[in-house]
Image (tube, grey):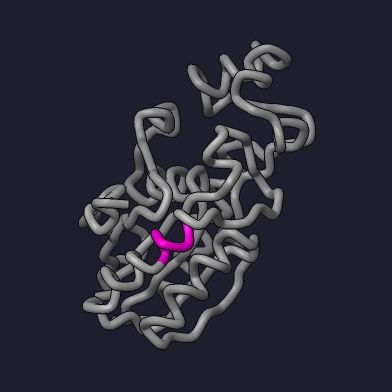
Amino acid sequence: MTNIYLIRHGETEWNKCSRVQGKQDTELSERGMRQAELLADRLSSEKIDIIYTSSLKRAKKTASIIADIIKTDIIEMDAYQEIGLGPWEGMTIEEIVEQYHDHYKCYREDPINFMLPGAETLVDVSNRTYNGILEIVEKHTNKNIVIVSHGVAIKTAIIKILDIDLHKYNRFRIDNASITSLQFHEDYYGKALLNTLNDTSHLKGV
């Protein structure tokens, strides 16, 4: 059995002001770095064998803080990057609602048909992250693996892994520094058992 721990990066300065990040290379806030330390404390009892991370700074920094504490190697993979949101990146939600009202309405109400010029679709990012996860599950049989990624990337991957309609996308919540854990059995890599979803119990008091 292979255990996957999907981690959303710690809080960034842009998270604090509800500014869309996408593939922009934003930095962790002080709170985000503390969250990563608490993640490491939580994961230290899980005997993690290896950490994979998105190649974006906020994920890499989260992964490096965890790795420094639990003494585990890190591998970067673009497959776990956040969805590219083109012209929305750097904008606040309020600005997007004002300037891209119809596109944002589709994103919220009909996500499977969301198409924004210059941006990835949710189907694209779902396939990208799902395939990336299966690749390392097959490579690291019976290991405990951390993947540090992003909110949209994790949500769409979970939906595909669990064979849930992508229209349910906006009914999932993935918080900063949360843990979502999955178990993959050796004879059935295509499916998984969901153990925890958006677990933030390790962040109490932060």
Q: Position of residue 35 (x, y in %)?
A: 39, 59
Looking at the rendered structure, the number of numbered marks drawn on it comes to 0
Measuring 40% from the left and 72% from the top, which residue is drawn there?
Answer: 137
Rendered image quadrant of residue 19: top right
Q: Position of residue 98 (x, y in %)?
A: 68, 12
Residue 35 belongs to magenta span: yes
Q: Is residue 120 above or below residue 201?
A: above
Q: Does residue 85 lie above or below 80 as drawn?
A: above
Q: Which residues are magenta?
A: 32-36
Q: Residue at 35% across / 29% down in the picture?
A: 171
Answer with left or right where residue 37 lies relative to residue 108: left
Expressed as whole percent of the image width and height from the top left, the position of residue 18 reads 56, 33
Q: Residue at x 64, y 60 (%)?
A: 56
Query: For residue 102: magenta?
Result: no
Left or right, 85 with respect to 1, comes to: right
- Does residue 9 show up? no
Using the image as rendered, state which of residue 99 and residue 167 is in the foreground.
99
